[in-house]
Image: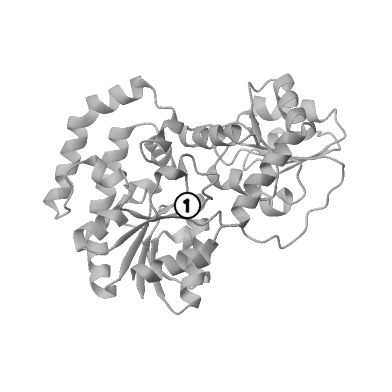
Amino acid sequence: MKIAWFCIPAHGHTNPTLGIVRELTQAGHEVYYFSFEDFREKIEASGAVFIGCDGYDFEMEDKENADRVGKDKVFATELLVSSTLALDEMTTQKIGEIKPDIVVSDSVAFWGKLAAMKHGIPYVSSTTTFAFNKYSSQYMNESPWDIARMLMAMPKINRQIKRLREKGYPVKGILDIVQNDNDTNTIVYTSKYFQPRSETFSDRYHFIGPSIRPVTEKEEKTADRTVYISMGTVNQDREFYHNCIHALGMTDWQVIISMGTNTEHYQDLPDNIQIYKSVDQMAVLSIADAFITHCGMNSASEGLYFRVPLVLFPQTPEQGAVARRVEELGAGVRLGSISEEDIMQALKSVLFEPEYKENAVRISESFHSCGGAREAREFLEELG
């Protein structure tokens, strides 16, 4: 079986797929992975053939553009259309050469879905967030104002859709592109238990659990309680970090902070606090007792996989949906503010009130009982 796989230039969307790619290639299937140069090494290590999408005036590579996509639907649509058309000639040529049996595309790498539509190839959505339909999308908390802005923007969006139709893409409207339905074959990297409103999805949705990298080097636990803080690369709120350092410096807990850049702003740290640009997150979570997180789907899932209750500090609507589900299942506490008092109160709740740990364990058990990469491979083999 030959598979054309498309992904956006983001580690959080690429990493979960690599276990499936490895499972497929080890079973003798051919995977042709359309991605970007920064990801070549890890994609090739999984056994796939890397096909570069760099150098095609592909605007989603620009981080500022990528950040704006989540906030501005007209801009997102224009970017999606421009990106699809920029890659059109190359993807058409490569698909003609490869003749794939299936196209698998990240749920927001819409050019992959559009290529499957244009060339009449069976399509599978790879969903590294929650699966969203009309029921679960209520977790995104879109305001009436957000919906009104979308409606006002529809004429501009429809002009972009027309550009696609002129290039042979059989698209009626924006929902054809961005919305999956119960007839869409879909791989979701979570459990049915963690997925909001999972009972509303058809059996075409395979909830295979998060893709967790094994711990290779152990992290040393140096205190009875270990607190891990990571806000991804998004949050560089110095006041938040200073408050964490000041408040936690007065405890006897081991505190590990993964901060991305700007570590030089934090000098003269208390002895119990260590700051790093990056850490082996699996190793740290394997010894952690609490995790302050921005609620990116991968980070939250990794924490819960290791049975760690969460302090929730979401930064985007998608992260807000993850935070809401964790709260609903009783495995975390949302940070009320970035004050030292609120940080400490949230941490004391998840560290010393046993139900948070118990509920994190329940979610972890649901992850461990999923079929993982093997289930995804068998699903794709049925379709191919």
Query: Looking at the image, can residue 228 be seen?
Result: no
Vertical placement of residue 305 versus 249, above or below: below
Vertical placement of residue 116 versus 72, above or below: below
Q: Amino acid at mark 1?
A: His
Q: Which is nearer the eye, 147 or 67?
A: 147
Q: Locate residue 364, reporting x and y percent.
A: 65, 49
Residue beneath the point at 54% across and 61% down: 372
Position of the C terminus by quadrant = bottom left
Q: Which is nearer the eye, 314 or 89?
A: 314
Position of the N terminus by quadrant = bottom left
Query: Looking at the image, can residue 320 be seen?
Result: yes
Residue beneath the point at 54% across and 54% down: 209
Instruction: Place residue 270 in its image quadrant.
Output: top right
Vertical placement of residue 344 versus 254, above or below: above
The answer to whether 112 appears left or right of 206 in the picture is left
Residue beneath the point at 14% across and 49% down: 165
Please rate how many residues cluster around mark 1, counting C-alpha atoms within 10 Å: few if below 14, some from 14 to 19, many from 20: many
Instruction: Place residue 312 in its image quadrant.
Output: top right
Q: Locate residue 67, reporting x and y percent.
A: 43, 37
Q: Locate residue 22, reporting x and y percent.
A: 51, 70
Q: Which is nearer the eye, 8 or 352?
A: 352
Q: How is the image coloured?
A: one colour
Q: Which is nearer the eye, 70 or 52?
A: 70
From this viewpoint, which residue is outermost toward the bottom?
28
Residue beneath the point at 54% across and 50% down: 191
Q: Give the secondary structure at mark 1.
A: helix
From this viewpoint, which residue is outermost toward the left?
166
The residue to which callout 1 is attached is 13
Q: Locate residue 36, reporting x and y percent.
A: 42, 59
The answer to whether 187 appears left or right of 152 in the picture is right
From this viewpoint, which residue is outermost toward the front?
199
